[in-house]
C-alpha cells in the first residue's frame, strides 16, 4: 500500500484544498499514481478538479456507509488524477455514523487494499468524526498554515487530537510536514510568522513556501489545477517543488 496523506487544518481559508489538488497534479507529473479523496462536505476539491458536484450519483458518503466500493465511486480524470468525489450530502453523514460499528474506521476499511502511490485526503475544516476517519486511515498528515496573524491559533488543539488518534486508533500516524501558504514576501509579517512556525515545528516545516498568488486563487473556479491553468505562475512553481519535497520525504 502507498502513502495516505491527510491534509488538515481546522481553520478554513488556509489553502488546504488548493494544496490537495495541486500537490496531486504535480505528483502525477512525477509519474506517481494519485487518488484524491474528498471528505469535506463543501466538495471544493471535487469542483476544483472540474467535476459537477450536483450531478453525482455516488460519493464518499455511500462509500463510508458501505453502499459501494472504492472502485465504483472513483472517477478517472483527464489530468491523470483519480478522484473519490463528494458533495453537500456528506454533511449529514456524521449523524448516520454515530450508531455504526467501527465508526472511526469506515474510511480505513475502504482504503486498506489501495494500490495508489499516493492517496491525498481533503479533510473538512473541523475536528469532526469525518476528520477522525481521515486520521485513522492516513499514514501521514500535512498541515497547511497561512502566513498571517493568528497562524498558530488552534494548532495546539489539532496536535492534541492527532496525538490521541495516534495513541488510541492509529499508531502509525506521523506528521509529514507543515506547509506555509499565502506567503507575501513584501511584508515583514509573513517573515515573522514563518520564523514563529519554524521555531514551533523545527525541521517538520517544508522548505517550499506557497506564495500568495492570484493565478492559484483563480484556477479552481475554472475546474483546473495550476499546472494546467498557468504552469509558469509562481504558485505553479511552488507546488511543483512541494511535490518533489513530499515525494522525497515519503521515500526517505
Image (cartoon, grey):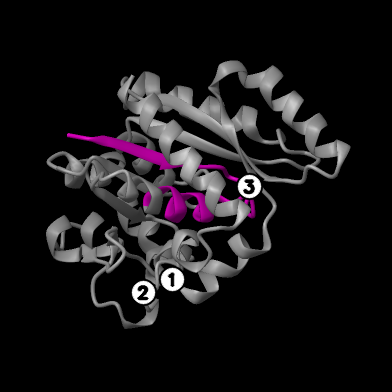
Circle 3 crowding by C-alpha within 10 Å: few under 14, some 14–19, many from 20: many
SS label for mark 3: loop
**Residue beneath disc 2:** 51
x 85%, y 38%: residue: 189
x 38%, y 79%: residue: 52
x 58%, y 45%: residue: 10
**Residue beneath disc 1:** 47
- Disc sitting over residue 11 in the figure: 3
Please give left or right for residue 249 compared with residue 235 in the image.
left
Q: Residue furthest bottom?
A: 55
Q: Earlier in the sequence, mark 3 or mark 1?
A: 3
SS label for mark 1: helix
Please give left or right for residue 22 compared with residue 216 in the image.
left
Residue 91 visible: yes
Q: Between residues 121 and 183, which one lies in front from this camera angle?
A: 183
Image quadrant in which the C terminus is located? top left
The stretch drawn in magenta includes residue 9: yes
Circle 2 crowding by C-alpha within 10 Å: few under 14, some 14–19, many from 20: many
Residue 156 % position (x, y): 63, 27
The quadrant holding residue 135 is top left
Residue 235 % position (x, y): 59, 53
Residue 51 % position (x, y): 36, 74
Image quadrant in which the N terminus is located? top left
Residue 126 visible: no
The quadrant holding residue 95 is bottom left
- Circles 2 and 1 in contact, beta carbons < 8 Å: yes
Q: Between residues 152 and 241, which one lies in front from this camera angle?
A: 241
Q: Which residues are magenta?
A: 1-24
Q: Residue furthest right?
A: 188
Amino acid at each position: 500500500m502507498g502513502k495516505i496523506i491527510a491534509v488538515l487544518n481546522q481553520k478554513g481559508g488556509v489553502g488546504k484544498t488548493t494544496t490537495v489538488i495541486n500537490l496531486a497534479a504535480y505528483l502525477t507529473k512525477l509519474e506517481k499514481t494519485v487518488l484524491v479523496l474528498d471528505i469535506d462536505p463543501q466538495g471544493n476539491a471535487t469542483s476544483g478538479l472540474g467535476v459537477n458536484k450536483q450531478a453525482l450519483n455516488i460519493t464518499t458518503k455511500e462509500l463510508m456507509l458501505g453502499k459501494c466500493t472504492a472502485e465504483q465511486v472513483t472517477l478517472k480524470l483527464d489530468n491523470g488524477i483519480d478522484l473519490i468525489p463528494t458533495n453537500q450530502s456528506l454533511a449529514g453523514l456524521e449523524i448516520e455514523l454515530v450508531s455504526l460499528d467501527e465508526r472511526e474506521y469506515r474510511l480505513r476499511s475502504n482504503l486498506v487494499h489501495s494500490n495508489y502511490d499516493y492517496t491525498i485526503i481533503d479533510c473538512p475544516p473541523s475536528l469532526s468524526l469525518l476528520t477522525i476517519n481521515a486520521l485513522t486511515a492516513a499514514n501521514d498528515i500535512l498541515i497547511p498554515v497561512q502566513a498571517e496573524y493568528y497562524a498558530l491559533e488552534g494548532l495546539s488543539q489539532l496536535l492534541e487530537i492527532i496525538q490521541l488518534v495516534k495513541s488510541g486508533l492509529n499508531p502509525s500516524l506521523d506528521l509529514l510536514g507543515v506547509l506555509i501558504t499565502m506567503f507575501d514576501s513584501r511584508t515583514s509579517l509573513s517573515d515573522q510568522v514563518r520564523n514563529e512556525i519554524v521555531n514551533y515545528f523545527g525541521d517538520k516545516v517544508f522548505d517550499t513556501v506557497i506564495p500568495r498568488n492570484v493565478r492559484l486563487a483563480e484556477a479552481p473556479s475554472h475546474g483546473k489545477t495550476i499546472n494546467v491553468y498557468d504552469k509558469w505562475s509562481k504558485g505553479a512553481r511552488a507546488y511543483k517543488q512541494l511535490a518533489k519535497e513530499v515525494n522525497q520525504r515519503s521515500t526517505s
